[in-house]
Amino acid sequence: MADTLAPKPALQRRRWSWRSQAFRGVVYQVVAISVIALVAWFLTSNTLTNLRVRGIQSGFDFLIQPAGFGIGETVIEFDSSNPYWKAFLVGLTNTIRVAIIGILIATVMGTLIGIGRLSRNFLLRGVCTAYVELFRNIPVLLQLLMWYLLLNELLPPVIDALNPAPGIYLSKGGLAFPVPVWAPGFGLIVAGALAGAALAWLYRRWALSQFVLTGRARPVWWPALAIFVVGIVGGWVAAGTPTALDMPEKTQFNVAGGGAVTPEFLALTMGLAIYTAAFIAEIVRSGIQAVPWGQIEAASSLGLTRNRQLKLVLLPQALRVIIPPLTNQYLNLTKNSSLAVAIGYPDLVSISNTTLNQTGRAVECITIIMAVYLTMSLSTAALMNWYNARVAIKER
Amino acid sequence: MYQKSAVKWIAGAAVLLTAAVSLPANAGKTLDTMKQRGALVCGVNVGLAGFSAADSQGNWTGLDVDICKALAAAVLNDANKVKWVPLTAQARFTALQSGEVDILSRNTTWTLTRDASLGLDFVGVTYYDGQGFMVPSKIKVTSAKNLKGADVCVQSGTTTEKNLNDYNKSNNLNMKPVVFEGLEASVKAFFSGRCQAYTTDASGLASIRNKEASNPNDYVILPELISKEPLGPAVRRGDDEWFAIAKWVIFALIEAEESGITQANVDKMKASTDPAVQRILGTGEDMGKLLGLDKEWAYRAIKAVGNYGEIFERNVGPGSALKLPRGLNNLWNKGGILYAPPIR
């Protein structure tokens, strides 16, 4: 404390002088922020004035009006008499659905292919290299259109839908499958799953602390998973083992009931995952290659098994290299999902296009899209930064 | 050094931004601008056979196209002085609002929302249409009411989505819209069998069936029309002179049909003693002056593209590839509802 208080007079003298770097720094920042604020104000007021002069109505009040259009595929319940903001929400959930599932598939595929590129097996290595070079060099829009047209050409029309197992239909109309009927007891299953997760976490903590105390390693993952599954099954039994399923049925033109995903969703998720996996594979490969070979040799000479070498030596160091560029790929996949409009999947952009045309509020709709994508990207980045901080080298 | 470059950077950015945002003001009168430019800029459909489509030589044809040609002939003395700007359904209103085009002649439905809140004025109706459904004939559906639970392919950026929903609700059909951004994509998806039905304006259905289907006879257009779709050109609000000119050139084309003036006989008709014909062709009273044009404005328009009936016949009528019946689009005294206010 005393150290910071001592040079106070000097600080005072420096504060208002143009020669002080700190003072100049503050001035530049104030000027820069004022310029940005001025430009933002000018753009906004200019737009508003121009819109008014040309007799174009503006404002966000349209959001509470009934939307009046239907959406073919929704995660949350939507009816055309719902307001526009709810339509946007449906679009957002559709986008998030594609993003999350796409990211999961792309990560798994990318990791496997990235490791495959380092394989000693010539055939495996060749196939993985070919995959990466093929898919990362073709524009993603073309790939999406290709998958979509392929699905639409290959699958049979709804009337002759493939029926590989009872209750499962695959056709140009999409993939329909049975889903459990929501029963009141389902709350217990969720509670069981939560309790299982909590217990699994407690077990993991205990196992780790035991390891620190006694040096005896206990298996962590399999018991934790088992506890989690027991929790779910316990909840299901407590709920009275509900087994009712909502089976899809063929109607005159379509398959109704049950759960369903459309070919648009399949093509979009598949296309984005396959495209992004090619990039992730390269990131994983570079991450692994960034760990010096000596580390593995050192681990071997310590007598660690192959699995432990991977888990304790290779992966922690590789992840440090992998996480930051991986974040970029996740953001890319999320943003690329806006190409959905080309193949008819009702994502945020598609819904907002429809809204824009019904209401004519172009500036407002574009602002909403930008704000939502920005928020989504920043949240993903924040999450990945947090994870990155966890795996980064901890200097003590 | 660092400070110097920072100052430079800020100053440079400020200059750049100011330059970037000094938008062009809504310059003067549309007519003056057009005369100066020597061309009418007309926003049309990217490609809808019969209404606006370009051939391999880049010549545009269609009903919407002919309206712009008539306007250019009336205003600039030359039907070919038109710059065509193909617009998607989504870009069309912004293009008109921002002044990119002088007139939007792109099978656009006249609705209250568009007329009242988009800063544009519809000048009239050039085609009375209604939304319909097209289905593959092999699914053996004869009425739209039988399309319960069907997937319906739609192009976004149109009034069709809302109409589809209204019809769905009132008939309890539970049809599912599959919405595509582009015409191309939506049509392809329908013809590949993704949807059991395709919906848009009936004239559009005829155009698509004729041009895009591998065998037009494999598809039927269902008899129900589920909405009113008065299609017409629109101009930017705030230029009443240009609004009046566009409006009256269209009226003149309809009036010409009513008075029996055609592209072929227009020169002969100049000798007519009928005062109504004389007023249209500028041989009697000078009507053009009131619009800020010369005497022969309507004469040139008719000479360039013919009267409304000829335009219809040539582009979409029974004699054309689309084979659309004249129906509502006939003159009021021939069973239709076309009625132009008198030129006098």
Image: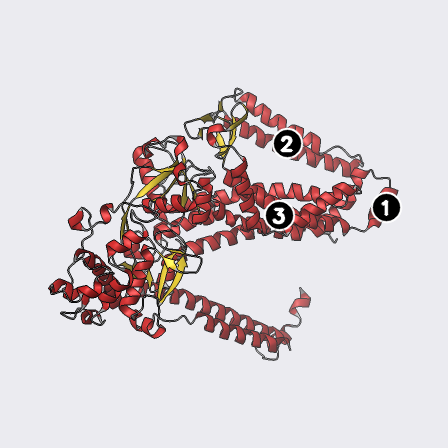
Residue with the mark numbered 1: A297
Residue type beneath disc 1: Glu
Against A181, residue B137 (above or below) is below
Q: Which residue is mark 3?
A: A276
Q: Chain of mark 1?
A: A
Q: Residues within 10 Å of mark 2 (few under 14, many from 20)?
A: some
Q: Which residue is mark 2?
A: A199
Q: Chain of mark 3?
A: A
Report the Cα–Cα distance between label 3 and label 1.
Answer: 33 Å
Q: Which mark is residue A198?
A: none
The residue mark sitting in front, 3 or 1, is 3
Query: Disc 3 marks which amino acid?
Result: Thr
- Residue at 58% x, 79% y is A17
Q: Residues within 10 Å of mark 3 (few under 14, many from 20)?
A: many
**Residue at 33%, 71% in the rendered image:** B34
Q: Earlier in the sequence, mark 2 or mark 3?
A: 2
Tag nearer the camera, 2 or 3:
3
